[in-house]
Image: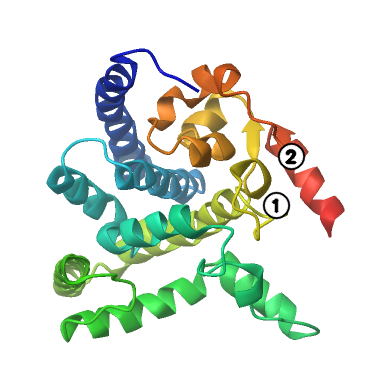
């Protein structure tokens, strides 16, 4: 697919403007439940909405890994979005770009040849551990400890190592401040009601959105038409996934801002091997695979 002169730059400028709006919606989506709980009392929908917004934040982080503003600004915004999710933005960026470079090859950490063969009674536990991101949180604890010693098992070079370690140290400082504050105020309900319960919901939603981008596809194939899905869905899910529903298109044309993918689909002319009409159709497809 060829772009007209200046077309990509125009898309990038529009993406910068749209991202401001996305951050405003995200911020309101996190603050309004807290205000409502303060005024009307804590209700069931409050952690649900906060969980939805937290998981949506990971999709915004994904866009930042590909560049929206400058590297420093993207890192600052990504760090703020990742704080409540225990996501280190610099580490996520390195890991995600590894995903783009090596998917389909044996160098990719999710290549079929590198996956554990879990069978029998262990399989439900394995699924639950990944669904709730328990494995991720355990690894995060280990990586925070490594970062205090200036080490990283994700970094490919010294610059990446320094950024990752610095991010973990800032995160740790933030967590210590939060814990100290709620301890002094004896307000542990804040952590439980407005962080941990929404985080559980966000973990499940994030896993479902991330995994469905590639699950059931040919992960030993380097062609995005075979190793990624494209999901044609409604405007709400396009917002929620931050256009991650067009994942095959994103992998094929990684440099194009995600906001422009829907409008360029016809020009891309991808031969999708994994295409779904909405997330309900996707769920039905995945159930058949089982």
Q: Does any portion of residue 205 appear in the rendered image? A: yes
Q: Which mark is residue 289?
A: none
Q: Nearer the viewer, residue 252 or 276?
A: 252
User: Dividing the image into 4 quarters, which one contains the C terminus?
Assistant: bottom right
Label 1 Cα neighbours within 10 Å, binned few <14 / some 14-19 / many ≥20: some
Residue at which label 1 appears: 217
**x, y percent for residue 236:** 54, 27
Q: Could you tell me if the residues under marks 1 and 2 are in contact, i.e. CB atoms within 8 Å?
A: yes
Residue placed at 14% from the left, 69% from the top? 166
Residue at which label 2 appears: 273
Taking the image as shown, residue 101 lies to the left or right of residue 238, namely left
Q: Nearer the viewer, residue 262 or 237?
A: 262
Counting residues from the start of the chain, the first of labels 1 and 2 encountered is: 1
**x, y percent for residue 40:** 37, 40
Indicate whether 4 appears above or below 21. above
Residue placed at 67% from the left, 79% from the top? 125
**x, y percent for residue 78:** 26, 50
């Amino acid at each position: 697919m060829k772009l007209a002169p200046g077309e990509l730059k125009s898309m990038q400028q529009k993406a910068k403007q749209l991202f401001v709006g996305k951050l405003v919606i995200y911020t309101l989506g996190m603050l309004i439940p807290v205000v409502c709980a303060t005024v009307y009392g804590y209700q069931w929908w409050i952690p649900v909405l906060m969980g939805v917004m937290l998981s949506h934040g990971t999709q915004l982080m994904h866009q930042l890994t590909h560049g929206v503003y400058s590297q420093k600004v993207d890192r600052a915004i990504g760090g703020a979005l990742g704080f409540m999710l225990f996501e280190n933005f610099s580490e996520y960026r390195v890991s995600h770009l590894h995903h783009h470079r090596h998917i389909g090859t044996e160098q990719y950490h999710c290549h079929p040849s590198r996956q554990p063969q879990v069978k029998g009674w262990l399989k439900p536990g394995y699924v639950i551990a990944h669904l709730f991101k328990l494995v991720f949180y355990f690894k995060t604890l280990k990586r925070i400890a490594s970062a205090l010693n200036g080490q990283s098992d994700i970094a490919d070079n010294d610059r990446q190592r320094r950024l990752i370690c610095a991010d973990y140290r800032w995160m740790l400082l933030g967590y210590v401040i939060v814990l100290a504050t709620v301890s002094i105020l004896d307000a542990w309900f804040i952590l439980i009601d407005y962080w941990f319960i929404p985080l559980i919901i966000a973990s499940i939603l994030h896993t479902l959105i991330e995994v469905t981008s590639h699950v059931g596809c040919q992960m030993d194939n380097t062609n995005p038409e075979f190793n990624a899905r494209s999901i044609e869905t409604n405007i709400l899910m396009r917002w929620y996934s931050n256009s991650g529903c067009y994942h095959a298109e994103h992998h094929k044309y990684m440099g194009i801002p995600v906001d422009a993918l829907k409008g360029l689909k016809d020009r891309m002319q991808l031969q999708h091997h994994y295409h779904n009409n909405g997330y309900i159709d996707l769920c039905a497809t995945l159930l058949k695979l089982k």
